[in-house]
Amino acid sequence: MTYTGAKVELEIEKIPNGLENPEWPLLIAGPCSAESEEQLMDTAQRLIATKRISAFRAGIWKPRTRPNSFEGIGVKGLPWMQEVKRKTGLRIATEVANAEHVELALKYGVDILWIGARTSANPFSVQEIADSLKGVDVAVLIKNPVNPDTELWIGALERINKAGIKKLAAIHRGFSSHEKSIFRNSPMWNIPIELKSACPELPIICDPSHICGNTELIPFISQKALDMNVDGLMIESHNNPPCAWSDAKQQLLPEQYGELIYGLLLRSASMKGEAQTILSELRENIDRLDDEIIQKLSLRMKISSKIGEYKKENNVTILQMDRWKNIIDNRINMGKAMGLSENFLKEYLELVHQESINVQSNVMNEKKS
């Protein structure tokens, strides 16, 4: 899917990664929730030992789906975060959901605020936060809304940017889905790609912890995110994950976090010399094939139009289930034999079939002048 709306103009300043190598992505790590000063300090010091952390994160307020769950330690955790910042020199980050959260977080020197998925889905809440940020120099990260809605995500970014916040980035944390999946939240990579198409200058950070929901998949999604050329990673790390008060299954030990980061492969976003020449030739081949595919699809729809005329003259229904089942079975088997995935073939054929039905419907319902 490609974003078809107008380009969105945002005034952006890069958030420095604070690492020795400026080419590394922004790396934000820390526990899901602040639980005690000892827990935060121990986790932060062990993360510093990895030499691969840009900022320390911890949730102070935790919006939960249902009541009677742990909803965050609250304001008493902010002095703990402030002490982590004082002793380690790390920038500190936490989630805010309203103007009061913003005021308190800024009072205790929080450097990076993020707006969660539930809050970013509510324009009223985002606007309240934006109004409270006017005249403030702080970095703000905005997670994607719970549901896959690019425009809603863009709207949240625009509201915060119009308040004067220039150190701005989006966080891709996956999307809610009723379909069964190995992921806690479906990655739906097409949505952050759409966002990047709309806002090319906007940094995008990936949150593998919330996409995966478990530690086993975090390395895979982290590498996938870097291969998609994201600008940073936000990964949850706890000094004793099995005893965590929230999201225990998706938090890594600081040492595991270090192993993960050092095991990731950074790839260049561009090529030079002979490699660039070869890549350009391959892309030209793809462009040529895409042109041919579009021409063939146009011819196919012209034939569908003629079929519509024939069905109209003979008073035949548009949908022929036996024919459609035959197409699905034959084309998928042929495509699989050629190395194409069944899911791709099914989605592609359904799209082509729907467009063919639309063409025939227009012909059959066209009134004679």
Image (cartoon, grey):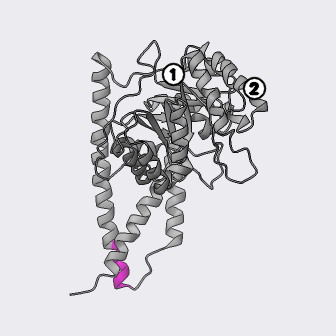
Q: Which residue is mark 2?
A: 240
Q: Residue at x 57, y 21 (%)?
A: 85
Q: Earlier in the sequence, mark 2 or mark 1?
A: 1
Q: Position of residue 23 (x, y in %)?
A: 41, 18
In this rendering, does residue 175 appear at all? no
Query: Quick check: 96 left or right of 72?
Result: left
Q: Residue at x 66, y 51 (%)?
A: 180
- Kindly state the secondary structure of the residue where label 2 is placed: loop
Quadrant of the frame with the C terminus: bottom left
Q: Position of residue 34 (x, y in %)?
A: 67, 33
Q: Residues within 10 Å of mark 2 (few under 14, many from 20)?
A: some
Q: Residue at x 32, y 52 (%)?
A: 4
The three-letter amino acid code for the residue at tag 1 is Ser
- Kindly state the secondary structure of the residue where label 1 is placed: loop
Query: Quick check: 21 left or right of 82?
Result: left
The reply to whether the magenta stretch includes residue 77 is no
| Most foreground residue, 320 or 361 | 361
Q: Which residue is mark 1?
A: 54
| Most foreground residue, 1 or 298 | 1
Q: Residues within 10 Å of mark 1 (few under 14, many from 20)?
A: many
Q: Quadrant of residue 288?
A: top left
Q: Residue furthest front?
A: 107
The three-letter amino acid code for the residue at tag 2 is Asn
Q: Position of residue 7 (x, y in %)?
A: 29, 47
Q: Which residues are magenta?
A: 307-314
Q: Residue furthest right?
A: 243
